[in-house]
Image: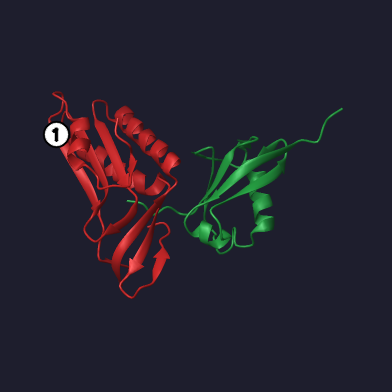
Chain colours: A red, B green
């Protein structure tokens, strides 16, 4: 099974392939990407840091929790760390399920919980050359 | 006779906590037995920013979020987790 924390570009197709099955009638994906502004400041890049071993475990727990809560739904979540340029994908989630309803619910849950629980932090680099850790956003 | 026992743990500081500590990790000695809360008190004696400049944080012991009563053992890895901002 693929790593949940990677330092290279995320292989989105491989993440999707991990949840594909003949039981699924819906496959949904979410990509979080690096945006050029935050809280009114011009962002030029983001350096993602993680407590890698724990973040990997938290992601696996979240995937298991989703499979338990929505039987038949499978989720795979991969987070990239290191320096990412504008527009690059920092997190990619693929969810498959028999029907779209539970698949949308599971996908929403996956990204919301990931942002609350996974020990990952953004260090934003700004256009003016300064940088700062983001907390809780 | 009971022997005085000391346990050694590794403490990891992530993100802003690493910046405030000036390093990513330290060794910490505690009297055995010890909990996450005992370790936190000892860290607060050493770092005045803990609970002040860094007012909100969570503690993990051996890669699991910990409660105050979570035991720490010799060789445990305790992490100071500032509010996360992944995604």
**For the residue labelled by badge 1, is the local secondary structure a helix, a strand or a loop?**
strand
Locate residue B55 relative to residue A44 in the image: left or right. right
User: In the orientation shown, which residue stands out farthest toward the top?
Assistant: A22
Residue at coordinates 45% horizontally, 40% vertically from top-left?
A: A54
Closest to the observer, B2 or A3: A3
Locate residue A46 relative to residue B60 in the image: left or right. left
Residue at coordinates 25% horizontally, 62% vertically from top-left?
A: A35
The percent position of residue A88, horizontal first and vertical second, equals 23, 55
Q: Is residue A73 above or below residue B8?
A: above
Q: Is residue A19 above or below residue B15?
A: above
Q: Locate residue A104: give its quadrant.
A: top left
- How many numbered dots are placed on residues in this image? 1
Q: Is residue A95 above or below residue B43?
A: above
User: In the orientation shown, which residue stands out farthest toward the bottom?
Assistant: A128
Closest to the observer, A104 or A137: A137
Closest to the observer, A30 or B11: B11
Locate residue B8 relative to residue B63 in the image: left or right. right
Q: Which residue has dot 1 on it?
A: A26
The percent position of residue B64, horizontal first and vertical second, equals 50, 38
Chain to which mark 1 belongs: A
Q: Quadrant of the N terminus of chain A?
A: top left
Q: Quadrant of the C terminus of chain A?
A: bottom left
Q: Locate residue A78: give its quadrant.
A: top left
Q: Residues within 10 Å of mark 1 (few under 14, many from 20)?
A: some
User: In the orientation shown, which residue stands out farthest toward the front?
Assistant: A8
Q: Locate residue B73: give its quadrant.
A: top right
Residue at coordinates 35% horizontally, 45% vertically from top-left?
A: A114
Residue at coordinates 57% horizontally, 43% vertically from top-left?
A: B78
The percent position of residue B80, horizontal first and vertical second, equals 54, 50
């Amino acid at each position: 099974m693929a790593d949940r924390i990677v330092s290279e570009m995320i292989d989105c197709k491989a993440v999707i392939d991990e949840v594909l099955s003949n039981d699924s009638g819906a496959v949904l994906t979410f990509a979080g990407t690096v945006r050029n502004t935050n809280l009114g400041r011009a962002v030029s890049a983001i350096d993602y840091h993680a407590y890698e071993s724990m973040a990997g475990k938290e992601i696996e727990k979240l995937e298991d929790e989703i499979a338990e809560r929505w039987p038949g739904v499978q989720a795979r979540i991969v987070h990239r760390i290191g320096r990412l340029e504008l527009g690059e994908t920092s997190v990619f989630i693929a969810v498959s399920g028999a029907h779209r309803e539970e698949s949308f619910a599971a996908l929403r849950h996956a990204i919301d919980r990931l942002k609350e629980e996974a020990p990952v932090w953004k260090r934003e680099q700004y256009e003016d050359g300064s940088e700062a850790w983001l907390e809780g956003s | 006779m009971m022997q005085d026992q000391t346990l050694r743990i590794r403490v990891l500081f992530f993100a802003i906590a690493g910046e405030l500590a000036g390093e990513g990790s330290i060794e910490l000695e505690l009297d055995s037995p010890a909990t996450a809360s005992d370790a936190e008190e000892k860290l607060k004696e050493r770092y005045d920013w803990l609970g002040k400049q860094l007012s909100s944080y969570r503690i993990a012991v051996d890669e699991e979020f910990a409660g105050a009563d979570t035991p720490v053992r010799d060789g445990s890895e305790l992490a100071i987790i500032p509010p996360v901002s992944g995604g």
